[in-house]
Amino acid sequence: MKKAIVLGGGGFIGGHLAKKLKNEGFWVKNVDIKKTHEFWDLDDISHEYIQGDLTDPKVVERVFKDTEGNYIKFDEVYQLAADMGGAGYIFTGENDANVMHNSALINLNVAYYSHLAKVKRVFYSSSACIYPEHNQMDPNNPNCEESSAYPANPDSEYGWEKLFSERLFFSFSRNYNLSVRVARFHNIFGPKGTWTGGKEKAPAAVTRKVAEANNGESIEIWGDGQQTRSFLYIDECIKATQLFMRQDDFSGPVNIGSEEMISINNLAKMAIEISGKKIEINNIDGDDFKKKYGFKCPTGVRGRNSDNTLFYEKIGWKTDKKLIEGITNTYKWILSQL
């Protein structure tokens, strides 16, 4: 039986991935700082679930060993664990030290012990947040081609840490022959993701606001709503990740995302249309936002869209799921949670 580790497997992408691996017949060790998973039965996503803080090297060492202290030869290791969240968490500046410190420690530990354990292959989930801010100022023409990452100028400390950790894993590949795969995720969304509490991302936040609103009410959208993004549905993300992980010729970095770009206001209009309600959009920015929340409106870059040219060239696969399908599924799921 093949063996896999999913680090951050108690999170949104990790839970979906761990379930897929288990259904494929892998023996799955799932590791997360959470004691339980909010939406999954642990038996569905793991054979062994370890609650532990991956910033602690002793915890990470234990993950890669058996009960007798011997290293296990894992076939696939997926490093998804990070200190992260949506715009309200990443762009206020209040969490920068934790984001950089915690995520960097996790990746230092995982790269080191993956090397010692001689795992067959490690996947590292980087982010579209590594791309230079100056290439994403035009909401209609952002440049997120992989080669545009340098000269580096991410718009957040989260992006800087991700860029550092990409280089970390590739350095272990060069110096210790660790087989790595590095992909830059672009806004993954879908059911069973964080949808409230401050760490939710745009699709979950918008669909939750629409689900909570009554006919004739309005929902609040941060900024002018003209900022653009692309969003990839979770099932497509898992498929692309596994296709990339299991081919032998290309290590990355490569984008994993959708090329269907949309403004945040139009995303809100899509969710409103799905709901069948009559709801107005209230854009809030500037002094009004600061008076209400106490910090500058966190909207991130003006435009971001995945460029999938390289992924298609190397892997030969394109996503064909339309955004409205994923948003519909997500809206229905969030509605069921309220």
Image (cartoon, helix red, strand yellow):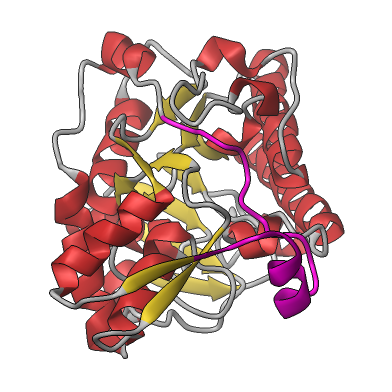
Of residues 79 and 309, the one drawn nearer to the viewer in this rendering: 309
Residue 293 against residue 5 in the figure, above or below: below
Residue 248: quarter of image:
top left
Left or right: 303 as drawn, with respect to 273: right
Q: Quadrant of the C terminus?
A: bottom left
Q: Residue at (77%, 76%) from the top-left corner?
A: 291
Residue 102: quarter of image:
bottom right
Q: Residue at (37%, 30%) from the top-left corner?
A: 245
Residue 270 against residue 319 in the figure, above or below: below
Of residues 179 and 86, the one drawn nearer to the viewer in this rendering: 86
Left or right: 117 as drawn, with respect to 221: right
Of residues 141 and 76, the one drawn nearer to the viewer in this rendering: 141
Observer able to see residue 138 = yes
- Position of residue 127 measured from the top left corner of the image (x, y, whole percent): 55, 38
Q: Residue at (50%, 42%) from the top-left corner?
A: 227
Residue 92: quarter of image:
bottom right
Residue 271 against residue 76 in the figure, above or below: below
Residue 290 counted in the magenta span: yes
- Position of residue 235 measured from the top left corner of the image (x, y, whole percent): 23, 50
Left or right: 139 as drawn, with respect to 249: right
Residue 90 counted in the magenta span: no
Left or right: 56 as drawn, with respect to 203: right
Observer able to see residue 193 = no
- Position of residue 297 measured from the top left corner of the image (x, y, whole percent): 69, 59
Q: Which residues are magenta?
A: 283-305
- Position of residue 76 measured from the top left corner of the image (x, y, whole percent): 42, 41
